[in-house]
Amino acid sequence: MVFSCATSNMLSVLHLLALVLTPLCSSYTPSDKVTKELVVQLCSKPTLYKNFCIAWLFSDPKTLTLDLHGLLGMVIEKTQGFGFRTIKLTKGLVNTTTDPNLKMIYGSCLTDYEQSTKGIEIAKGYASSKVYFSAFMAAYKAMMAISDCETLIEAQPIPAYFSRRVVMFERMCSTGMVFSKVLKEGK
C-alpha cells in the first residue's frame, strides 16, 4: 500500500507538471461560443477522460447555450454539487457502517471530500473573477485531495458505487482544472 500511495502521489505530481509545462492551446477565449466541436476539442485535451467529459457535458442542455467562461462556471458548479451530495452520502456511511475498517476509510474520505469541495468553492470564486490560473491551481488541489481517497480505497473491499463516485468526482475536478488552464492560456 505504501508503494501504491507513493506511486499515486508521484503520478499526480507528474500530471501537474505535464499540465503546467505543456500549452494546451492559446486560441481559446472566454467569449468563445460553445459548440459540439469545441466540446469535443476540449474534452480531447491531455489528462481528460474524453468519453466521460463529452457525455457529462452533453447531458446538460445548457452546455451549447454558453460561452467558454460560462462552461467553466457550469463545470465547477456541477462538480461542487456532486461533491456536496457525496459528502452527505459519506457522512451517512460513516454513521451507519459497523465495520471499523470501513468506518476509518469513509471517515478519511469524508475529510478528503470536504477539503476537495472547499477547493472547488475557491476555484469557483477565481473562475467567476476570470483569474483562471488561480482557478486552475484550486481545482488541482481539489483533485489531489480526492486522489488521496482514491489511493486509500485501492484494494479495499469498498462498495462499487462509492468507488465510482470517487473516480467521477476526480474526473470532474480534472475537467475544471484543464478548462481553467485553457482559458488562462487564451487570455
Image (cartoon, rainbow, N blue to C red):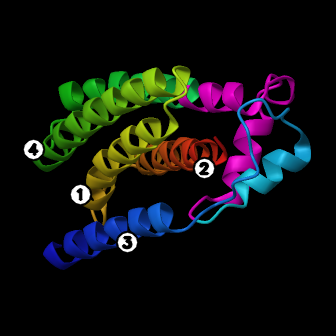
The mark nearer the N terminus, 4 or 2, is 4
Q: Which label lies toward us, 3 or 2?
A: 2
Q: Are marks 4 and 2 in contact (CB under 8 Å)?
A: no
Identified at 56% across, 42% down, the residue is 180
Q: Secondary structure at mark 3?
A: helix
Identify which amino acid the numbered label 1 is placed on. Answer: Leu
115 relative to 43, above or below: above
86 drawn magenta: no
- Identified by mark 4, the residue type is Pro
Q: Which one is in front in this view, the residue at disc 4 or the one at disc 2?
A: 2
On the image, numbered disc 1 is attached to which residue?
152
Residue 130: % across, % down: 55, 27
Residues packed near mark 1 inside 10 Å, few (<14), some (14 to 19) or many (20 plus): some
Residue 62 is covered by the magenta coloring: yes
3D distance between C-alphas at marks 3 and 4: 34 Å
Residue in view at x 80 percent, y 24 percent: 66
